[in-house]
Image: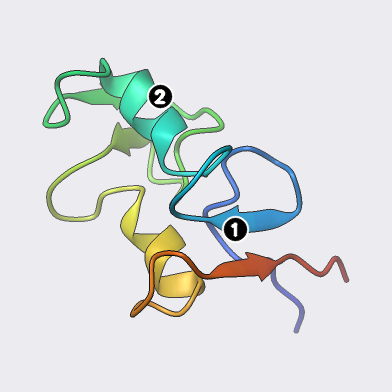
């Protein structure tokens, strides 16, 4: 079985939670920028967990998988994607 890491919102072959060109910020922009508790119901690039809801904060949000997939402890880590 081969799978890709979830959360590559920017589609640059790297998971990045913090810093410039990270995968977390586009999720916040999609839900309204200054309103992190908003959600948007649609499938789009920012729907990192592919549940049909773009969500920045709360349970089953789209930014937590990014943090988990880069190692979970240090938000400055990155993970390079490897295509099968």
Give the residue displayed 14% in from the left and 21% down from the top.
35
Residue where numbered disc 2 is placed: 42
- Closer to the chain start, of discs 2 and 1, is 1
The C terminus, quarter of image: bottom right
- Asked if marks 2 and 1 touch (Cβ < 8 Å), the reply is no
The N terminus, quarter of image: bottom right
Whole-percent x, y for residue 80 in the image: 72, 67
Q: Check the image and report above or below for 20 versus 64.
A: above
Q: Is residue 41 visible?
A: no
Give the residue displayed 47% in from the left and 46% down from the top.
48
Residue where numbered disc 1 is placed: 15
Q: Is residue 77 left or right of residue 62?
A: right
| Tag nearer the camera, 2 or 1 | 1
The furthest residue to the bottom = 1
Whole-percent x, y for residue 24 in the image: 42, 43
User: Mark 1, residues whose alpha carbon is within 10 Å: few (<14), some, or many (≥20)?
Assistant: many
Give the residue displayed 38% in from the left and 75% down from the top.
74
Question: Marks 2 and 1, how far apart in space?
Answer: 22 Å
Q: Check the image and report above or below for 11 versus 17.
A: above
Whole-percent x, y for residue 20 in the image: 54, 39
Q: Check the image and report above or below for 13 versus 53.
A: below
Q: Which quadrant of the structure image shows residue 57?
A: top left
Q: Is residue 70 visible?
A: yes
Query: Which label is found at residue 1?
Result: none
Give the residue displayed 46% in from the left and 65% down from the top.
76
Disc 2 is placed on an element classified as: loop
Q: Which quadrant of the structure image shows residue 10?
A: top right
Q: Check the image and report above or below for 72 versus 4.
A: below
- The count of marks equals 2
Whole-percent x, y for residue 14 in the image: 69, 56
Disc 1 is placed on an element classified as: strand
């Amino acid at each position: 079985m081969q799978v890709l890491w979830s959360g590559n919102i920017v589609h640059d072959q790297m998971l990045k939670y913090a810093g410039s060109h990270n995968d977390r910020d586009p999720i916040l922009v999609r839900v309204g920028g200054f309103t992190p508790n908003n959600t948007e119901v649609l499938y789009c690039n920012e729907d990192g967990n592919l549940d049909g809801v773009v969500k920045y904060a709360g349970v089953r949000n789209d930014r937590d998988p990014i943090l988990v997939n880069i190692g979970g402890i240090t938000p400055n880590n990155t993970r390079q994607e490897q295509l099968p």
